[in-house]
Amino acid sequence: MELRHLQHFAAVAEDRHFTRAAERLMVSQSGLSASIRALERELRAPLFVRTTRRVTLTEAGRALLVEAERILAQVRAAHEAVAAVQGVVRGTLALGTEQCIAGVQVAPLLAAFRGRHPDVEIRLRQAGSGALAEEVGAGRLDLAFAYRTQADTDRLRSVSLTSEPMTVLCHPGHRLASAGAVPAPDDLAGEVFVDFHPDWGPRRATDAAFTAAGVRRTVALEVNDVHSLLDLVDENLGIAVVPRHFRHKRPSLTALPLKGTREAEYETVALLPPERATSPAARALVTLLETEDLAPPQGPRATS
């Protein structure tokens, strides 16, 4: 089995298309097809189901993809480690982040990183914290800015970015705004909630707060972006419980502290694989993040 066969297989699996994969790899489509056929002959199993419109993985293909990604990540790490010893950071930085993450400004951070390490190709993926943690653990991402849960940090390293309380957002005409009191989860029973998909960090933090308080809630309006959530609350269609910094994105809404949920504060971190599996590019990004001029106000702190 040749390394290029695995590289070709992984590209087709990612693109789900032979032509697009061939263009990205800068090889002929016939050469790519021959490489995949050679791999299938060696493994004695079909790896893809091919139709005129799409390509999908077979069960054997899905099993191979897990190992192929692991092997290719190790090969990349080997190249990058040698370059790092020579004083040059090269290769790829695969970064994941949740939308509107607190404690780090992703765009300025990446701009500064590119200025210091121009030979590194930056790839950015935005997703929920659950998916990001899985991808860091699987080696598909070098690090991710995400919400901290104990399950994640039991298997991954983390650098804390910031911690903040959860806040209730509601329309100024809502009963909570006129009451002028600081609500507890009990006071919100029966309310219509706007929230994110369960994979998102803010949703995980809110679910944890209400579970700890023994209060059931129903999310009637579920969204996958911050602006949609704010728009729905702005139309008085429901309330939201979100990290405190969200209140600055829509000053017209009323923001109220959520009482009695200190144990469910929203902590964001940089999630990394174990030290031995951390790429030189990821180490360089964390070093840059920890420098005085780019750190968040309270500064990141390393945790296990």
Image: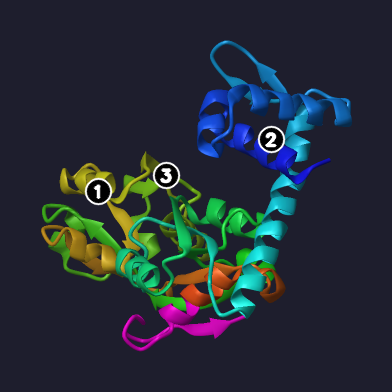
Amino acid type at circle 3 is: Thr
- According to the image, label 1 marks what residue? 227
Amino acid type at circle 2 is: Phe
**Residue 263 in view, yes or no:** no
- According to the image, label 2 marks what residue? 9
Left or right: where 122 falls relative to 232: right
Give the structural element (helix, strand or loop) at label 3. loop
Q: Where is residue 274 in the image (x, y as percent from the top left)?
A: 68, 72
**Residue 80 in view, yes or no:** yes
- Distance, label 2 to label 3, CA atoms, is 43 Å
Q: Does the magenta stretch include residue 287?
A: yes
Pointer 1 with pointer 3, Cβ within 8 A: no
Work out which quarter of the rendered image holds the N terminus and state it. top right
Q: Is residue 97 magenta?
A: no
Establish if 170 lies above or below 247.
Answer: above
Which is more toward the observer, 277 or 36?
36
- Distance, label 1 to label 3, CA atoms, is 21 Å
